[in-house]
């Protein structure tokens, strides 16, 4: 078969041997897959959190809050990638937090989000957040392996067992609060076995029954599987992380909370003869002076707070979790701005550490956080694309000078 080119030219298909040689030449000049940056030498890792959702971590009516437009997400991610930040971590959401702002009412699905961002970045790790009650292990393995090949080994999984029933009602799925971590652990066991490769296998378990001829091809670039994150404040959540995760996220709102939290995590890890990296999440307001930053924090988090959205979150999330001895454990919602002031600062996300101040303030606070034993944190902004350049230009070099990060 032939076809007509311009000016009457006849175009013929390239000979197969020539096409294959060209393909081999392309492969030969490609750089080898980089190691996942989550495991690089930086003492304090940084990731971007929740930018796939409108509002990010801002429960505020401030009109400049993040709109989660796709082109802005791509532009912001490329800045983070060029700056050497370690990872992108999206949130899986199916329904907003109501209120006047309805934070998370608009969001991008995280597996397709991960594949798309993976194709336009070079170094940054791309995590996908998966609600395991909604995705089969076989689909999850195939999807994560796909992203791992798109990124040449930069994919990761944030595994979520589910907590907000109102979101799962959209799918007709009911979350059993008593067995959700048991279900998630069995999901992880099947998913990881698929990505390890090997012969087909069947599975008949407690939650997943009559799975036949399980296999996925291709398997992941990272061996035996990409890294796994999990968030767990309750004892059961931490035990799940001890058995399934490489990174555990904990809510920290003041640094004096950290020693007790890490000691408890160590106890859970010791039961399974494992260690784990522990991260937390933060919200950054960085301005040339501390006064400017605190004024802006007061504006968006107090004056423009979406109080109804904050109340929805706390009502559905719960203020406490049950400890191993049955006693209630309070979630860490208070921080240096709310404690003793009589103000709620409800426009800030509950459980997020407030990095508010000048570049020196924020770098020094992150250094103190690192000194407690935390391995890193995520950052979020009222307007990611507008604010991340200043963070990258002013805070990241200070962290390098403090010995917490290397020059990318």
Image (spheres, rainbow, N blue to C red):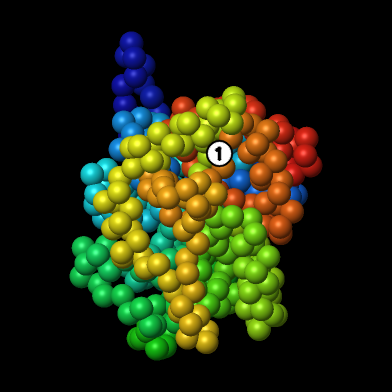
Q: Residues within 10 Å of mark 1 (few under 14, many from 20)?
A: many
Q: Position of residue 92 (x, y in %)?
A: 37, 56
Going 28% across and 68% down the picture, which residue do you hit?
A: 165
Going 59% across and 31% down the picture, which residue do you hit?
A: 290
Going 26% across and 51% down the picture, which residue do you hit?
A: 308
Which sits in the foreground, 298 or 366? Answer: 298
Total marks placed: 1
Which sits in the foreground, 8 or 201? Answer: 201
Which residue is under mark 1?
Answer: 356
In the rendered image, the quadrant that contains the C terminus is top right
The answer to whether 90 is drawn above or below residue 362 in the figure is: below
Going 34% across and 19% down the picture, which residue do you hit?
A: 5
The answer to whether 117 is drawn above or below residue 200 in the figure is: above
Q: Is residue 396 left or right of residue 232?
A: right
Q: Is residue 35 left or right of residue 119?
A: right
Q: Position of residue 268 (x, y in %)?
A: 62, 78
Q: Is residue 279 left or right of residue 49?
A: right
In the rendered image, the quadrant that contains the N terminus is top left
Quadrant in the picture for residue 80: top right
Q: Position of residue 75 (x, y in %)?
A: 46, 30
The answer to whether 258 is drawn above or below residue 88 in the figure is: below
Q: Is residue 41 visible?
A: yes
Q: Position of residue 280 (x, y in %)?
A: 57, 56
Dot 1 lies on which element? strand
Q: Is residue 378 left or right of residue 111?
A: right
The answer to whether 268 is drawn above or below residue 299 in the figure is: below
Q: Is residue 145 visible?
A: no
């Amino acid at each position: 078969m032939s076809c007509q080119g311009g000016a009457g030219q006849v175009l013929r298909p390239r000979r197969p041997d020539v096409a294959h040689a060209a393909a081999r030449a392309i492969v030969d000049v490609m750089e080898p897959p980089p190691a996942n940056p989550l495991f690089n030498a930086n003492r304090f890792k940084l990731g971007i959190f929740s930018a796939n959702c409108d509002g990010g971590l801002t429960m505020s009516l401030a009109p400049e809050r993040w709109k989660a437009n796709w082109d802005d997400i791509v532009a912001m991610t490329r800045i983070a990638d060029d700056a050497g930040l370690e990872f992108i971590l999206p949130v899986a959401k199916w329904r907003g937090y109501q209120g006047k702002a309805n934070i998370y009412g608009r969001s991008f699905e995280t597996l397709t989000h991960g594949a798309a961002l993976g194709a336009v970045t070079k170094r940054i790790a791309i995590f996908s957040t998966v609600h395991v009650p909604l995705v089969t292990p076989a689909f999850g393995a195939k999807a994560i392996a796909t992203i791992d090949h798109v990124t040449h080994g930069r994919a990761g999984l944030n595994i979520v067992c589910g907590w907000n029933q109102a979101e799962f009602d959209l799918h007709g799925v009911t979350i059993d609060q008593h067995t959700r971590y048991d279900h998630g652990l069995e999901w992880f066991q099947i998913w990881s076995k698929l990505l390890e490769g090997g012969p087909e296998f069947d599975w008949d378990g407690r939650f997943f029954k009559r799975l036949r001829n399980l296999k996925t091809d291709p398997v992941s670039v990272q061996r035996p599987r990409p890294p796994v994150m999990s968030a767990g404040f309750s004892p059961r959540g931490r035990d799940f992380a001890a058995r399934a995760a490489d990174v555990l996220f904990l809510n920290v709102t003041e640094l004096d909370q950290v020693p007790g939290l890490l000691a408890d995590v160590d106890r859970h890890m010791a039961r399974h003869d494992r260690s784990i990296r522990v991260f937390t999440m933060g919200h950054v307001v960085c301005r040339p002076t501390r006064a400017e930053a605190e004024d802006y924090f007061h504006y968006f988090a107090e004056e423009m707070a979406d109080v109804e959205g904050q109340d929805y979150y706390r009502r559905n999330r719960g203020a406490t979790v049950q400890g191993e001895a049955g006693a209630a454990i309070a979630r860490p919602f208070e921080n240096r701005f709310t404690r003793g002031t009589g103000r709620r600062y409800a426009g800030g996300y509950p459980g997020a550490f407030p990095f508010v101040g000048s570049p020196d303030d924020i770098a020094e606070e992150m250094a103190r956080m690192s000194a407690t034993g935390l391995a890193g944190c995520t950052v979020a902004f009222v307007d990611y694309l507008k604010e991340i350049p200043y963070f990258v230009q002013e805070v990241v070099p200070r962290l390098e000078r403090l010995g917490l990060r290397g020059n990318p």
